[in-house]
Image (cartoon, helix red, strand yellow):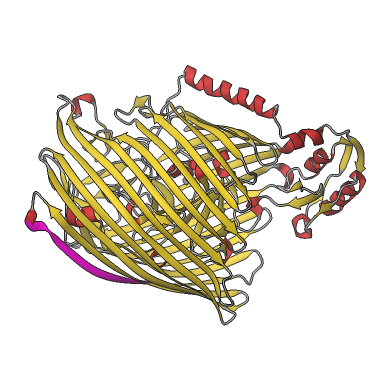
Amino acid sequence: MQIKHGNISRKKEGSVARTPYRAPQWVGTLLWSALVIGGLCSASLPVQAQAVAAQAAQDYRIAAGPLGQVLAEFAAQAGVTLSTDAALTRGLQSPGLAGGFTVEAGFARLLEGTRLEALRNAQGQYVLVAPASLQPVIVTSTRTEHDLMDIPLSVSVVGGEDFTRMPNSNVGDQLLAIPGVQLGGANVAGDRRIMIRGHSAGATLLLVDGIRQPEIRNTAGAGFTINTADIERIEVIKGPASVLYGSDAIGGVINIITKKGGPEPLGGSIGLIADSSTDSFDPRLSLYGSSHGLYYRVTGSGLNADDRKAGDNVTLFNSSYRQRSVRGLVGYEWDNGSLQFTAERFRGSNNYTPVIADADGRYRPADPAERTTISEVPKNDRDAYVLALDMRDLGENLVGLKSNVYYQKLDKGFDYYSYRTGVYSGRHLYRHEAWGGSLQTDWAMLDDHLLSVGLDFDHIRMDKHDYLPVHNVSEGILRTTALFAQDEWSLTPDLTFTAGVRQTWIRTSLDRDTANPDRVDSKSYSNVVSSMGLVYRGIEDVALRALFSQGFKAPNLTQMMIGSGVIIPNPDLKPEKSNNFELGARYSGQDLNVDFTLYHSTFRNGILNEIVSTGPTRWQAYNVDRARSWGAELAADYTFGRSGFSVYGNLNLLRYETEDKNGFKTRHSSRSPAWGTLGVGWEKTLSGGRTLFADFNAMAGKGAYTLQANGNVKDRTSSWYTLNTTVGLAGGKEHEYSVTLSLRNLLDRSYQIASPFSPSSPLPEPGFHAVLGVNVAF
């Protein structure tokens, strides 16, 4: 997998574990499928590659020496033109070349192990290029385009070949390799949530092409409804980013950037991800193209997953889920701008696995005799429509203008019934309708300033219909308006100062409650956040950064006004606020990449859930007086020259201390104090543009628990580790096909990931399992 920190490119296979393996026919089918499809793909190389391979081989005798000189001599003897950048070959040596080779086979042999490629352009000339992993990483999560080395935020990027080398149906599993990121477990399979730096998933803002993805009901954060086949890259901001994005960006931001059109008028791809931990098949089909500025893409996918197979030969009851999605876009691009319309339709359903706490505070799946009420989500639907305009170079000072408008509708149903009798005790339907937009202008001022100013507006209406045990209707509105500004000041050629501020106005109202007509209420409040950062680039291949940033998270409609079948609303909730301080350094060299961050955050009015009644259990959100966290993140990778081997790893340390309204302090709140990954990767470039790759890694995390004021312990999880390996083949000039087989949790470990997710509890992760990813472009 490729995870980029600064210009860091790190190969690693990420997702953790799945099913106990008994050599079933299903996994055998996976293996045979990989072999058959790989053979078919090998037989169907692109026409151009076949034509070159068919050329008569020429005999070469080129002595060892500096790579740049050897390449120049080879191009001269072959009678071809080669364009190079001396910086790409500086310091590299070549063993020379002897024997009969075609032009492309000769280039492949000379460049083996360098991560460089010689690509043939339309004029028949060859150009020496570095792969994306060695080129500057451009990010947009700062709301303007920047080289990742030039921004004060801690940002990691997943994209490109990462999705080939670590096939996953769920976006959350794709992010496991990023420092500071953990899966937020809950007792809902197929509904991954992401924690950043120990904050619960509700403190992580999820965006798709910059558009906020809301959670309809609770505090667990938004779930992923986009298929990985549509994703170009994912940018993850670690730490508060509320100046840029407002509420919910208190722990961090996940911004998913989607694919656009293709290079030809008509193209497409067909793929499949199969996972033995749930006996699931996830087929996907994409059609895309572009011509004369007009581009389009349509993707459809469908996933059926059975009950999860965890470690120790345990199958989790009621953990199956289903997902269907169709996404289409059409756009027009001209010299200095683009206009794009996107429509998305997602249909899903999933179930809750009943869990029970043992005497030592550990949650486990309930035995049949312990199962009482069963929860299901028979309806989890989303429709979204977005119109986005992006323009550049509009005048001497106005260098950019971005605007979008959107509409989203989410429908989510919850059913509760008795395990023993099958009689329904509760039935609820939530409808969440949101519309809004943003406008941002970027100004180049006084030669050394880039000023961005903008407006964000969101209007959310939620309707809750309770059908059982009695019929009740509740309706509420959450309206948010914000103004923001951020200035980048180039103090010197090597030193940049960035400062920003955001003013937000929020109005929350309960307009209707048929069960409690007198409870109709409204509240309005405002909030100001700011940030300041420095980046120093005066040392070659090094970026030093310092940042102060503030975040806030406003209570949602469910917490404050509407409530749910298990949540009692609390109209007295205050917004959660934070201050964050961090120092970081990035080094990006030819073979070694390092990213190191130290951070400290303080919180006020942290929003947590507490049991206020039992039989049935009822929860209510409340504000804790204070929380503090300290942490360190280290990520590094090293490539061993031309051998094709690399090593990589990351280490995360976290101390998280909470203090409740009664003064009780604890460092134990079900947040893991340490986790990380260590792995080795290998790749070899073959003739015809094919790449063979392999990976082996170990992932581990320390256990955690929650200590209550009365001395009781709950939500206990043990320390864990897994071993994982992947092998694959990608072929063709543009990787027209790929076959990847990933074996995860090789030792079939049974484990749970620590998560501060009350009132939910983490499920056991999958035991030993195989994941097969196949994709063919046409």
Whether residue 307 is situated above or below residue 531 in the rendered picture:
above
Give the overall secondary structure of the magenta segment: strand
**Above or below — where is 151 with respect to 76?**
below
Give x and y (percent) for residue 464: 20, 47
Where on the picture, by quarter, is residue 268?
A: top right
Name the residue at 33% across, 46% down: 755
x, y percent for residue 258: 51, 49
Question: Image check: 606 left or right of 78?
Answer: left
Q: Is residue 452 magenta?
A: no
Residue 765 vs residue 189, the one in the foreground: 189
Residue 293 visible at all: yes
The residue at the point 17 percent across, 58 percent down is: 510
**x then y, percent, for residue 746:** 49, 30
Residue 410 percent across, percent down from the top left = 31, 46
Closer to the camera in the image, 28 or 78: 78
Q: Quadrant of residue 525?
A: bottom left
Q: Give the vertical position of 759 relative to 416 (above or below).
A: below
Q: Is 624 situated above or below 365? A: below
Q: Is residue 185 visible?
A: no
Magenta residues?
518-531
Labels in figure, total: 0
Task: Please state, as top left, top right, bottom left or bottom right, where the N terminus lies in the image.
Answer: top right
Residue drawn where x is 23% and y is 60% of the image: 624
Q: Nearer the viewer, residue 180 or 294?
A: 294
524 is within the stretch colored magenta: yes
- Front residue of 404/618: it is 404
With 746 as the anchor, is 684 left or right in this view? Answer: right
Q: Is residue 596 left or right of residue 553?
A: right
